[in-house]
């Protein structure tokens, strides 16, 4: 029997909030593991329990039941030396608006017990890595949304963590900023860092994550690699057919999504299905992706 | 690993921001009380005895009010709008660190405001006494600490500026009725009793005789004990409430 090398282990992890209107179970006894050097995506709609799980990982939320360990130690018992190996990129920017860009990194580094002499080298390096050198003397309020996000990630790297927890790292960013952050996260993964991220962008999860955990209503719906999940839940091809739908199309699984109907067709039948579509019909043919899986598992109803 | 105590690092962070806001701080917490003090001095043609009564009162009130106000606004902003407390907790700090650093910082800089008033006010009124200032400072410091801790109790239950701005009339009432420029015995007994529940009254009761080199052991014991007890109770309460707020 080999020892469990998982960096994060959650077993029966439960969080119940007590409210006047009654108890609310935000996380319902979930089990998952995160292996070192991998990127794991925690995906789910709003209110699924992702942020609560993130909070428990950071020690900001106390589990009601179950165990959650990082580096083999329960999160409530992590030593300072262990906590220094963990960093968080929160969902909402909480950069220090009273400090300059470089001061944000410098002061944060001091919190982790890093020597000033080390920080004097590391801060410019990180600013360069995140393409923020020109803004080193600027106040946070002078930065664009993308710059703030890059600075938040730079701040999370100041302690050279082994585990980087990212809560929606690219939400609200333009494509250029997202691509830069993706590049940096992939580079970090290559250096052996462990990433755990939540995101609403399925293309992001598909691109970055080795393992996906789909979560909703506090429960894990399924987990696996992006490819495994797609193969398991959706036929390989999706034909997004704009209404009116031509008659006499072969019968395949279909889903009415308003202005169009999605036809889910397996790999072997995709060519035949395409040939059966009249020339005048408007449609988009694409491979099935993680978004299809996500919508299948969590539904299309809007969550507030 | 531990190079500097973490509350000290937070204090360093605060000092960086403070230097950028020094003119605002000096204006709000030193210049305004000084103008009031000078106006009273000139307008009412105060004699030496009255000046010796007022200067320590203004010192304590200015310092403790500054500590209270900068806590309820500054700390509230860091807690709710900036999310600073949450980011500090994620960087290995504890709720104790955050609480200690914010309170010590707010109280310390406010104490300097009190000292500034003592020096400038004493000089303006012609009764500057360095020994008096020195002896008055412990009362100023403890009143500021207690006021800042009380501010943290309020902050840990507040969600916006509206929740703390309701205390502005209390600040005004405390300024008028705590014995800053008139003995508390001039006011109704109920008001006198109410004033004993807040730190500025006790700060003044101990700093005034100390400033005039008339402090007795008995008076010092009573009021320092009350101030220390207030600090202890407010700290415990603020810690409990803030922990509940930050760690769910």
Image (spheres, helix red, strand yellow):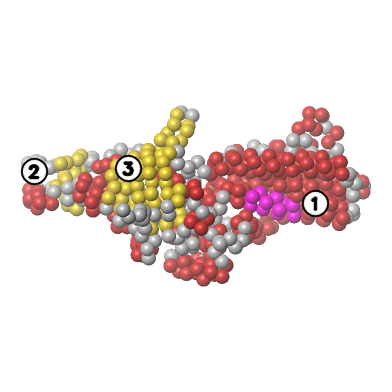
Residue underneath mark 2: A250
Quarter holding residue B17: bottom right
**Which disc, if any, is residue B164?**
none
Disc 1 versus disc 2: nearer the observer: 1
Looking at the image, do the residues carrying marks 3 and 1 touch, with CB atoms under 8 Å apart?
no
Number of residue marks: 3
- Asked whether residue A76 is drawn in magenta, I would say no
**Residue drawn at 29 percent across, 47 percent down:** A223
In the image, is residue B105 part of the stretch drawn in magenta?
yes
Q: Which circle marks residue A220 in the picture?
A: 3
Which residue range is magenta in the image?
B100-113
Separation of residues labelled 1 and 2 (CA atoms)? 89 Å
| Quadrant holding the C terminus of chain A | top left
Which residue is depicted at the point 17% across and 41% down?
Answer: A254
| Chain bearing mark 3 | A
The answer for how far apart the CA atoms under marks 3 and 2 are is: 35 Å
Q: Position of residue A71 (x, y in %)?
A: 43, 54
Q: Relative to A18, is B224 above or below?
A: below
The CA span between labels 3 and 1 is 60 Å
Secondary structure at numbered mark 2: loop
């Amino acid at each position: 029997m080999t020892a469990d090398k998982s960096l994060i282990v959650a077993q029966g992890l439960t969080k119940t909030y007590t409210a006047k209107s009654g108890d609310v179970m935000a996380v319902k006894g979930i089990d998952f593991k995160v292996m070192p050097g991998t990127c794991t995506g925690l995906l789910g709609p709003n209110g699924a329990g992702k942020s609560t799980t993130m909070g428990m990982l950071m020690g900001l939320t106390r589990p009601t039941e179950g165990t959650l360990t990082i580096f083999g130690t329960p999160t409530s018992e992590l030593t300072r030396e262990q906590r220094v190996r963990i960093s968080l990129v929160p969902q909402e920017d909480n950069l220090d608006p009273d400090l300059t860009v470089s001061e944000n990194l410098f002061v944060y580094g001091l919190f982790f017990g890093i020597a000033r002499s080390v920080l004097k080298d590391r801060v410019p390096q990180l600013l360069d890595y995140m393409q923020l050198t020109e803004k080193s003397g600027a106040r946070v309020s002078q930065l664009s949304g993308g710059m703030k996000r890059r600075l938040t990630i730079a701040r999370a790297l100041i302690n050279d963590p082994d585990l980087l927890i990212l809560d929606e790292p690219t939400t609200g960013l333009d494509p250029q900023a997202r691509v830069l952050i993706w590049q940096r996260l992939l580079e970090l993964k290559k250096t052996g860092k462990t990433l755990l991220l939540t995101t609403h962008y399925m293309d992001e999860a598909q691109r970055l994550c080795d393992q996906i955990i789909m979560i909703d209503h506090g429960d894990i719906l399924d987990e696996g690699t992006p490819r495994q999940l797609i193969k398991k839940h959706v036929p390989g091809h999706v034909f997004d057919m704009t209404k009116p739908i031509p008659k006499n199309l072969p019968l395949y699984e279909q889903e009415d999504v308003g202005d169009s109907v999605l036809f889910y067709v397996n790999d072997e039948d995709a060519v035949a299905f395409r040939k059966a579509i009249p020339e005048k019909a408007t449609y988009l043919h694409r491979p099935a992706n993680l978004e299809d899986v996500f919508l299948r598992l969590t539904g299309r109803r809007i969550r507030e | 690993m531990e190079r500097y105590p973490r509350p000290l690092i937070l204090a360093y962070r605060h000092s960086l921001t403070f230097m950028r806001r020094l003119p605002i701080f000096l204006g709000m917490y030193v210049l305004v009380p000084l103008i009031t003090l000078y106006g009273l001095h000139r307008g009412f043609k105060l004699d030496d005895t009255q000046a010796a009564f007022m200067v320590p009162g203004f010192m304590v009130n200015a310092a403790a009010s500054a500590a209270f106000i900068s806590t309820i606004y500054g700390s509230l902003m860091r807690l709710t709008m900036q999310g600073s407390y949450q980011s500090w907790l994620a960087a290995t700090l504890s709720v104790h660190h955050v609480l200690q650093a914010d309170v010590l910082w707010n109280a310390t800089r406010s104490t300097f405001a009190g000292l500034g008033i003592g020096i400038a006010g004493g000089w303006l009124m012609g009764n500057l006494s360095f020994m008096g200032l020195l002896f008055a400072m412990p009362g100023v410091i403890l009143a500021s600490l207690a006021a800042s801790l009380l501010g943290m109790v309020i902050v840990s239950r507040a969600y916006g500026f509206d929740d703390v701005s309701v205390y502005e009339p209390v600040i005004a009432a405390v300024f008028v009725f705590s014995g800053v420029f008139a003995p508390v015995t001039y006011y109704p007994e109920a008001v006198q009793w109410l004033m004993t529940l807040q730190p500025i009254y006790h700060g003044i009761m101990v700093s005034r005789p100390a400033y005039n080199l008339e402090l007795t052991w008995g008076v010092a014991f009573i009021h320092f004990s009350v101030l220390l007890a207030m600090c202890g109770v407010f700290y415990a309460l603020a810690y409990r409430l803030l922990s509940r707020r930050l760690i769910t």
